[in-house]
Image (tube, rainbow, N blue to C red):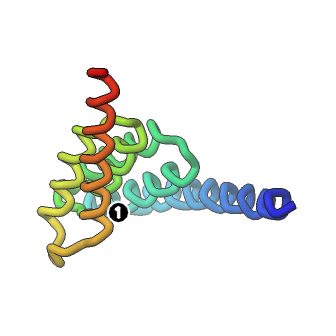
Amino acid sequence: EDGIRDQPRSRGLGDVYKRQIAHYELSLQDTELDSDKSIVHSNRAACFLKLGRLEEALKEAERSVSLDEKNVEGNFRVGLALHALKRYGEAVKALEKAQSLEKKKQNKDIENAIRMAEFMGRKQAAETSA
């Protein structure tokens, strides 16, 4: 019964993310600065990640970084997308870049993502060699 009750909420969130993607698309048309466009692409990447549209998420995150290579969130979302695509070695590199750009230097989300990508990479390597 709980699963049935949760379904409309889940579908509702999907609709929210789809509307946000459309909103961000319009924002791109009104934005001229590359640094601002980078933020919009990073936000679109987050929405695509939430929707499970991983290749689109990676494309948006990479576009974000191409516009502003110092965008911490853009680099972080490249790493998250690569991780979700099971490309763990690449994910670690992107996440480490995000960490190196982070001004706080102690971003727990990035640190945890790096640890998880490293762990999954070791697990994947062990399964491949077994």
Q: Residue at x 23, y 39 (%)?
A: 90
Residue 97: x %, y % from top left: 16, 55
Label 1 amino acid?
Ile
**Quadrant placement of the N terminus:** bottom right
Which residue occupies 69% across, 57% down? Answer: 15
Residue 7 in picture, x, y percent from top left = 78, 57
One can see residue 29 in this view: no
Q: Position of residue 22 (x, y in %)?
A: 58, 55
Task: Give residue 44's position: percent from left, percent from top.
Answer: 46, 55
Question: Is residue 14 left or right of 87 when viewed as pictured?
Answer: right
Q: Quadrant of residue 34?
A: bottom left
User: Mark 1: which secondary structure?
Assistant: helix
Q: Quadrant of the C terminus?
A: top left
Where on the picture, by quarter, is residue 46?
bottom left
Image height check: is 128 above or below 73? above
Residue bearing mark 1: 39
